[in-house]
Image: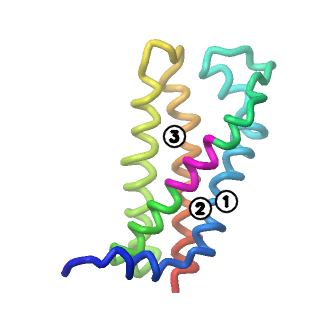
Amino acid sequence: MKMNVLNLLSSINWFSVLLAFLAYFFLGALWYLLLFPKPYRISLGRDPDINSSQSSLYIVGPAICAAIVTITTAILMYALPITSYADLVPFTLLIGIGYLFSNTVNIAINPNMPRPFFYGLITGMYHLVGMVLVTVILFAMKH
């Protein structure tokens, strides 16, 4: 059966996408500003006591990326036969670990990242927890 993208997009609960995006985005603020600010800075090779990210780029950039990830996840959820929370678990792990966590570690493995696996652990876990929030919100509001 061929998927009609316009029908798929029109069937998405866009309010759930907004709520899922907000949860993912605000988790990032909580994660990096309150829960793990010092380990995050250490993973970047920076002084753990100095917050140097004052630019709006550090807010707008992650917001745009979180929105894209959330929309893409919603499209995949509506295109695939996810009909129960039991179906949701492997889907969430596939996206969270298979794409987001592994890609985070891959990006960190470069000469400019002093502690790539530590960075990958902190940021990868943020994305995995974020995917749990996103997929649960999207699924709960799907019907």
Residue located beneath label 3 in the image: 124
Q: SS class of the residue under badge 3?
A: helix
First of labels 1, 2 by sequence position: 1
Residue located beneath label 1 in the image: 23
- Residue 58 place in picture, x, y as percent: 68, 35
Disc nearest the viewer among 1 and 2: 1
Do labels 2 and 3 touch, CB within 8 Å?
Answer: no
| Residue 55, numbered circle | none
Q: SS class of the residue under badge 2?
A: helix
Q: Residue at x 74, y 30 (%)?
A: 55
- Residue 59 place in picture, x, y as percent: 70, 41
| Residue 133, numbered circle | 2
Q: Residue at x 50, y 62 (%)?
A: 71
Q: Residues within 10 Å of mark 3 (few under 14, many from 20)?
A: many
Q: Determine if the magenta segment contains residue 77.
A: no
As drawn, which residue projects farthest toward the bottom?
143
| Amino acid under disc 1 | Ala
Q: In the drawing, does residue 93 fall left or right of residue 52?
A: left
Q: Residue at x 39, y 47 (%)?
A: 99
Measure the C-alpha gap from mark 1 to mark 2. Answer: 7 Å
As drawn, which residue projects farthest toward the front?
6
| Amino acid under disc 2 | Leu
Q: Quadrant of the N terminus?
A: bottom left
Q: Residue at x 80, y 19 (%)?
A: 50
| Amino acid under disc 3 | Gly
Do labels 1 and 2 touch, CB within 8 Å?
Answer: yes
Q: SS class of the residue under badge 1?
A: helix
Q: Determine if the magenta segment contains residue 62.
A: yes
